[in-house]
Image (cartoon, rainbow, N blue to C red):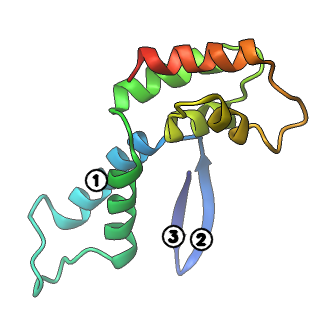
Amino acid sequence: TLLLEVSMKVKKIINEEMMTLPELREELISIRDQRAGGVEETEGSVRTLSYELRKSIDHADTLGKCSVDTAKALYEELVALEKITPTIAARIVNIMPASREEVRAIYAKERFVLVTEDVDQILDIIRKYE
């Protein structure tokens, strides 16, 4: 996820960090509340939210499969495993795979193949947080 600084219509990246969908949803809602001044939007309101922000929040609502606290705990436990990078851990948290095939699909573009024991270990960790 990128945080951008806007100045005279020139954008530059000021911070970049990995986020899961539940964390992204929380951040988007915070942005929505800041822009709306804590007031619910109305159709004729000057403070209507951009289409992109509304759709992003809807997307995160629809696809987010756990709470922020659960996502953070699961992410930390997955990153501690040997063959899981932060990027893959975030994908796993976002997708919450339920089968060996789904875990293997996440690893499809990686340069190594997981053995069945590794896949089962990942699935066991995910099941603790469902």
Camera-side residue of 89 and 38: 89
The residue under label 3 is which amino acid type? Val
**Does the residue at mark 3 contact the one at mark 2 (Cβ under 8 Å)?**
yes
Camera-side residue of 128 and 4: 128
Residue at 16%, 83% in the rendered image: 46
Q: What label does residue 62 carry, if any?
A: none
Report whether 26 appears left or right of 40: right
Outermost residue, bottom direction?
A: 44
| Crowd band around label 3 with a 10 angstrom C-alpha radius: few (<14), some (14–19), many (20+) | few
Q: What label does residue 11 carry, if any?
A: 2
The residue under label 2 is which amino acid type? Lys
Spatial separation of the CA atoms under disc 1 and disc 2: 22 Å
Report whether 98 appears left or right of 116: left
Residue labelled with disc 1: 29
**Does the residue at mark 1 contact the one at mark 3 (Cβ under 8 Å)?**
no
For mark 1, give the secondary structure: helix
Camera-side residue of 119 and 2: 119
Q: To which quarter of the image does residue 53 belong? A: bottom left
| Crowd band around label 1 with a 10 angstrom C-alpha radius: few (<14), some (14–19), many (20+) | some
Against 88, residue 129 (above or below) is above
Residue 61 at x, y percent in the picture:
32, 52
Residue at 28%, 51% in the rendered image: 30
Residue at 36%, 69% in the rendered image: 55
Q: Earlier in the sequence, mark 1 or mark 3?
A: 3
Spatial separation of the CA atoms under disc 1 and disc 3: 20 Å
Against 76, residue 68 (above or below) is below
Spatial separation of the CA atoms under disc 3 and disc 2: 5 Å
Q: What label does residue 6 carry, if any?
A: 3
Residue 28 at x, y percent in the picture:
35, 54
Camera-side residue of 14 and 113: 113
Residue 17 at x, y percent in the picture:
59, 42
